[in-house]
Image: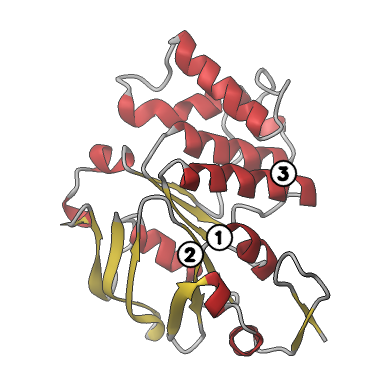
């Protein structure tokens, strides 16, 4: 569905990613893991067509992503960025409804079915009762969930998310990950940058490991999240926690 071919990304003459070849198919959920500054955000921006790589290309439906008109691209690919202004003046429901803008002639829609869809997303992400609350008065974690709801409202075939779990407590981290996993099960392609290998192990099927040298490894979660790979990735010593249901590593 969306693929990177020979993708290389550099920043200030430093190689972040070199010659990455991946293909994210419909129904797959991928995690991106790496230390701060390893290129996770840059990779997502390139995959969304918002950053030009230094080499290679991103292809969507076998067509270079730069060849898609922006409005058409927004109907197929959504992205939740790491940072966004909290100064939006409208209600939380209005904010979520903005996700329909690529498919609408106006920024807002009075369609009752779409309004009910937005309300359903707010409920799914535990924002019931907040629909009339001004978006700017939400807490950091509530705004983060509203941002994800807006992305889901966009109803794209490919979802890109940069640290979707930031600001979230454990309950809401799990709620967000389950919501994204449901989209993958329904046939969406999901790629998200995470900091928690345990959460990636539990709910993602594939992973990309970004190393500081520009080297990247990718593959199935069960094969990639080994103690050796993660110690090399995070440059600290780890040990497996005593959990049989998911693979967890903790510092030692």
Q: Which residue is mark 3?
A: 141
Name the foreground residue: 113 vs 135: 113
- Crowd rating for badge 2 (residues with CA inside 10 Å; few <14, some 14–19, many 20+): some
C-alpha span from label 2 to label 1: 18 Å
**Of 129 and 183, the residue lying toward us:** 183
Secondary element under disc 3, as helix, strand or loop, is helix
Q: How would you rate the neighbour count of disc 1 (Cα within 10 Å): few for under 14, some for 14-19, many for 20 or more?
A: many
Q: Which mark is residue 204?
A: 1
Q: Position of residue 137 (x, y in %)?
A: 72, 31
Spatial CA distance of label 3 from label 2 is 20 Å
Residue at image position (33%, 62%) is 51
Q: Earlier in the sequence, mark 3 or mark 2?
A: 2
Viewer-nearest residue: 73 or 187: 187
Residue 41: give its label. Answer: 2
| Residue 24 vertical position relative to residue 21 in the rendered view, above or below | above
Tell me where residue 186 sits by quadrant.
top left
Q: Quadrant of residue 36?
A: bottom right
Q: Earlier in the sequence, mark 1 or mark 3?
A: 3
Q: Kindly report the distance in space between the C-alpha atoms of the residues bearing marks 1 and 3.
A: 22 Å
The spot of residue 154 in percent (x, y) is: 42, 34
For discs 1 and 3, the disc positioned in front in the rendered view: 1
For the C terminus, the image quarter is bottom right
In the rendered structure, which disc, 2 or 1, sits on the residue that comes first in sequence? 2
Label 2–label 1 contact, CB within 8 A: no
81 relative to 154, above or below: below
Q: Residue at x 53, y 29 (%)?
A: 96
């Amino acid at each position: 569905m969306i693929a990177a071919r020979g993708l290389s990304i550099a920043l200030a003459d430093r190689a972040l990613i070199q010659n990455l070849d991946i293909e994210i198919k419909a129904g797959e959920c991928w995690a991106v893991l790496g230390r701060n500054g390893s290129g996770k955000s840059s990779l997502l921006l390139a995959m969304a067509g918002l950053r030009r790589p230094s080499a290679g290309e991103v292809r969507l439906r076998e067509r270079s992503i730069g060849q898609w008109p922006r409005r058409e691209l927004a109907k197929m690919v959504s992205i939740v960025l790491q940072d966004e202004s909290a100064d939006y003046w409208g209600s939380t429901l209005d904010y979520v409804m903005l996700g329909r803008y690529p498919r609408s002639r106006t920024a807002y829609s009075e369609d009752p079915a779409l309004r009910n869809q937005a309300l359903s997303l707010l409920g799914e992400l535990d924002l019931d009762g907040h629909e009339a609350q001004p978006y700017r008065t939400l807490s950091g974690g509530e705004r983060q969930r509203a941002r994800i709801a807006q992305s889901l409202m966009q109803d794209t075939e490919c979802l890109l998310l940069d640290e979707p779990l930031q600001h979230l407590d454990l309950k809401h981290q799990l709620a967000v990950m389950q919501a994204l996993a449901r989209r993958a099960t329904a046939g969406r392609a999901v790629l998200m940058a995470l900091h928690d290998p345990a959460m990636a192990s539990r709910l993602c099927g594939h992973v990309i490991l970004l190393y500081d040298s520009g080297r990247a490894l990718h593959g199935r979660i069960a094969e990639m999240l080994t103690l050796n790979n993660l110690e090399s990735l995070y440059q600290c010593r780890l040990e497996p926690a005593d959990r049989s249901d998911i693979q967890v590593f903790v510092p030692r």
